[in-house]
Image (cartoon, rainbow, N blue to C red):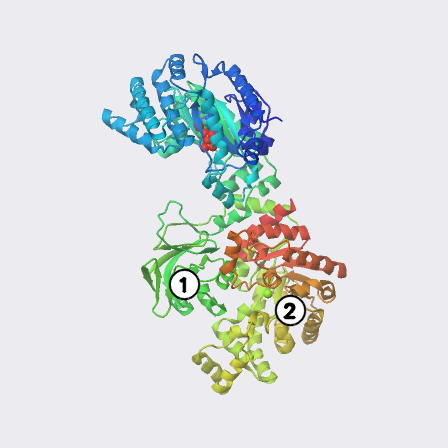
Amino acid sequence: VKWVYSFGDGRAEGRAAQRDLLGGKGANLAEMCSLGLPVPPGFTITTEVCTHYYANGRTYPPELEAQVDAALDEVGRIAGRRFGDPARPLLVSVRSGSRASMPGMMDTVLNLGLNDETVEALAADSGDPRFAYDSYRRFIQMYSDVVLGLDHEVFEEILADEKARRGYDVDTQFAAEEWRAVIAVYKERLEAELGEPFPQDPRRQLWGAIGAVFSSWMNPRAVTYRRLHDIPEEWGTAVNVQAMVFGNMGESSATGVAFTRNPSTGEKALYGEFLLNAQGEDVVAGIRTPQSLTEAARLEAGSDRPSLEKLLPEAFAAFVEIAQKLEGHYRDMQDLEFTIERGKLWMLQTRAGKRTARAALKIAVDMANEGLISRQEAVCRIDPASLDQLLHPTIDPDAARDVIAIGLPASPGAATGTVVFTPEEAEEMKARGEKVILVRVETSPEDIHGMHAAEGILTTRGGMTSHAAVVARGMGKPCVCGAGTLRVDARSGTMTALGRTFRKGDLITIDGSTGQVLAGAVPMRQPELSGDFSAIMEWADAARRMKVRANAETPADARTARAFGAEGIGLCRTEHMFFDEARILAMREMILSDTQQERRAALAKLLPMQRADFVELFEIMAGLPVTIRLLDPPLHEFLPKTEEEIGEVAAAMGVDAERLRARTEELHEFNPMLGHRGCRLAVSYPEIAEMQARAIFEAALDAAKRTGAPVVPEIMVPLVGMAAELSFVKGLIEKVAKTVLEEAGAQIDYLVGTMIELPRAALSAGEIAGEAEFFSFGTNDLTQTTFGISRDDAARFLETYRKKGIIEADPFVSLDVEGVGTLVRMAAQQGRARRQGLKLGICGEHGGDPASIAFCEAVGLDYVSCSPFRVPIARLAAAQAAC
Ligand code: ADP
Ligand code: MG
Ligand code: MG
C-alpha cells in the first residue's frame, strides 16, 4: 500500500483532486509543485494512515517507516542535504492537514531536526549564528508545547525575564550568544519539568511530531469542531513533512499571508500582510504588527512602514505573478502563505479563501465577467442563506456588544428601539415617531398591529416557528425569540436580564441573525443591494425552472415581494386581514352570531373591506398569479377575551353581554389547531366562504378593468382531508362565481385548488386532484400533523433531540425529506396522474429554505412561495437546485 506521496522539484505524486487522501494542504502543495511553482520539497502521509492508526490501537502500518525514510531521502536529495546529518542537516516542518480546514488540530512544528550539533551546522552554513540559535530556540518552544505537552507559558516567562534583564523590547535584539544562553535555560527548565532532556535524535523528533498530529485528530477541541461542522470522524488527517525555508534569515527574508482579492469587499486587488525577518507563526501570533504587502494598501492605511513591494521588489513581483497564476488555475480567490528566504520566494500553501457575503457576490460576478468562470458557476458559488446578511441592516462588526441575553435567531437583521411591552404601546410610541422593540412572553395574532409598528420583536418563549418568528420573518422584521433568561413583567412595565432592569422607554438592540439581545443602541450597517446582487439574481433567474412567489397579504408586503422579484403571491392568508381594529369588531359579530341571518349581516360589513384588500393586491401584482386562501384559523383566535371587549361587541350587535359570554364559552375548543378551522368553517358556515368568494371575484373584475390586465385568481381551500370536503366548498365558490358574473355580465377565469397539509389529503391526493386545479403543500401543518408534534411547543424538546443526535435539523425549518417529503412526493405523483398539468407549489416556511427548495425541484413542483424577504434567497436556491 502506498502511504506516502512525495512532491518537489516540479513534480508530485499527488494532485489537487486528491484532497480526501492527502488533505487540503497536501493536495494543493502537490498541485503547486506540478505547476512548476517554487515549493520546498516534502511529502504527505495520507489520511488512510490516520484511519489505520485508530483502527489498530494507535499503531502505524508496517510499511510506513520505510516509505517515510525513502521520501525523506528524496527530499534531502532535492535540497542537497540529509536529515540528521551533522554537517549538512535537512530541517523540516511537520504540518497537519485534513480535508476540511480544521482549527483545533495540532499546530505546526517548524525547524525540526535541529539539535545541539545541527544548530552549529546551520550557523556555519548560513553564516548567521544569530539566526541559527533563534531557530533552535523556536523549535524547542514549539516542539515542547505541541508534542511534549509543556505549557508554552513556561518559555514565555523565561524569555520575558531574559528580555527584561537586558532591557530589550523585541526578540530580534538578541545576539547569537544571548540566544545560546536562553537555549541553555530552556533545556534546563524543560528537563526539570519533564524529567527527561530535550530529544536530540532527529528521527525521534520526527516520529514524535507525526504521532502528535495523528493524536490531535481526537483531541477535545477537534472533536467538538467536527461535531459542530458535521465533519465525519472517519475522514482523518494527513501529515505533511516539508523542507524548511527560512523567513528569519535577516533583512532580505520575510514571511506572509495574502488573498488574491480583498476577502471583505471582494475588490480585485492583492491583499495581504508580511513580517520581515520572521517565521510563519509570528504573523498570526500577533507578536509584531505585520506590514502591508502592496504600496497601494500601505498608502490607504496611512502607514509609514514600507510595503513588501518597496522592500523586496523582485520577490514581490514573483509573488504577484504566482498569485495570479494560482487564481487562474483554481478559478477562485486564493488564500496564500509564502516565505522569502534571502530574496528567494517560496510558496507554502494555497486554498480557496474565506470571504464575506458581500465579497462572495462581487468576486463571483467579477470572475464571470472576466470569463474565468461561467455565469452558472457564479450563481452556484453564492450561499443562498448568506444573502440574509445583505438584505437587512446588520450590527457593525467592530461595534462593542453589551449582550444581556441570547435567544433564537428567529428572523434576521438587527434593530434598535425603546422597549415596549404591549402592542398598544408599540403603536402609540410609533405614532410619536419613536422606534420600538416589542417585548412579549410570546405573541398571538392579536399582537399583529403592534408587531407592524415595532422595529423588531423579542420574546422569551417559543421556537423558530413560533407565531412571533413566523410573522416577523413574513414582515422582514428582526426577531429574537425564546430568550429564556429574560423576565418580562408587562404589568409593571419591566424586563430583567442578568440582574439588570430595563423599563419601558429604555433602549435595546436585538440581532435576529445571532439571537443576541444587547443593551443600548449599537452602530449599524445598512444593506446595499449593489449591482453585483442584481447581476447574480438575473443570472439565477435565467438558470432556474421553478417560479418563486411570496406569502403576502398586506399591500406593503406585496410591494416588497415584487421589489425582491416575486412572480406572484403563493399564499394570501385572509384571516390576517381581519385583525385590524376596525374589522375585528365585525369579525367578532360574525363569529358570535347565533343565526345565519345575523352572520350574513356581519359578513356584509366585511365584504367591502375584503374586496378593497383584494383589489389592491391584484393591482400591485399586475396580472401575476395570486393565490388566496379562504379563512383558515380556529375562530377562537378572534374571540373577545376581556369583559371590555365583550361589552363592545354586544353593543355593536345590540345584544345582551351575558348571551355573548355564553356563546364565547360554547366556542371554546380543547385542541383548536385540530379543531373547527380550515374548510370545516366553510362547511359549517357556507356564508363565510361565499362572502370571500364574492369579494375575490368582484375585486378581480374591478382590478382587471383598472389595470387592463386580466386577473386569474387562484382560490385555495385550506385543511382539506377528503375530496368530498373540497367538492362541497368548490360548489359554493362556483355558485357565487356564476352569480357575480351574471350580475356583471363579464367573463372571468379562476382556479380552485387546495392546500395539502394533512396526511389524509396526501394519501388521497389522486381523488382530491379530481376536484382541485392546483395543490399547494402547506408544509408547516403537514409537518405538524405528520410528526404529531405541535409546532408551537416543539422548541422545548426538539433542541434536545438535535443535541442527542435523534434528529439532524428542525423539521419545521428544513423539510423532513424522509417522512413529510415522502408524502409530498406521493401526493405530487398521484395528483398529476389524475389531472394533467396540475399546478404544484409549496407555501410553508420551507419554501424559503435552500435545502427544502432543492427537494421541491427534485419533486418537480412548479413554484415555491416564501416570505417576501426570502424571495431572493429562494430565487438563488431554485437556480442552484436546477443546475
Ligand atoms: P496552519 O494550517 O495553521 O496554517 P501551516 O502548516 O500552514 O499551519 O503552518 C503555518 C506556517 O508555518 C506557514 O504559514 C508557514 O509560514 C510556516 N511554515 C510551515 N512549513 C514551513 C516550511 N517548510 N518552511 C517555512 N515555513 C513553514
Ligand atoms: Mg497555513
Ligand atoms: Mg395550515
Mark 2 belongs to which amino acid?
Leu
Q: Vertically, is 381 above or below 693?
A: above
User: In this figure, which residue is indicated by the disc labeled 1?
Assistant: 439
* Pointer 2 local density, CA inside 10 Å: few below 14, some 14–19, many at least 20: many
Q: Quadrant of the C terminus?
A: top right
Give the mark, 2 or 1, whose residue is nearer the N terminus. 1
Residue at mark 2: 701
> Secondary structure beneath disc 1?
strand
Rounded to the nearest whole Å, what is the CA distance between mark 2 and mark 1?
43 Å
Seen in the picture, residue 74 relative to 304 is either above or below; the reply is: above
| Rendered location of residue 66, percent (x, y) | 56, 21
Residue furthest front in the image: 195
Residue positioned 60% across, 31% down in the render: 18
Q: Nearer the viewer, residue 648 or 154?
A: 154
Residue 713 shows up from this direction: no
Residue at the spot 30% in from the left edge and 27% down from the top edge: 170
Q: Is residue 579 visible?
A: yes
Please state, as top left, top right, bottom left or bottom right, where the N terminus lies in the image.
Answer: top right
- Measuring from the top left, give residue 345's x and y in whole percent: 46, 21
In contact (CB < 8 Å): disc 2 and disc 1: no
Residue 845 x/y as whole percent: 56, 58
Q: Is 265 situated above or below 393?
A: above
Quarter-of-image position of residue 331: top right
Q: Out of 572 and 113, give the one closest to the viewer.
A: 113
Residue 863 found in image quarter: bottom right
Q: Please, what secondary structure does the residue beneath circle 2 have?
A: helix
Three-letter code for the amino acid on which mark 1 is drawn: Val
Q: Position of residue 107 (x, y in %)?
A: 44, 32
Relative depth, front residue between 582 and 86: 86
Left or right of 688? Residue 829 is: right
Q: Which mark is residue 363?
A: none
| Residue 782 sits in quarter | bottom right
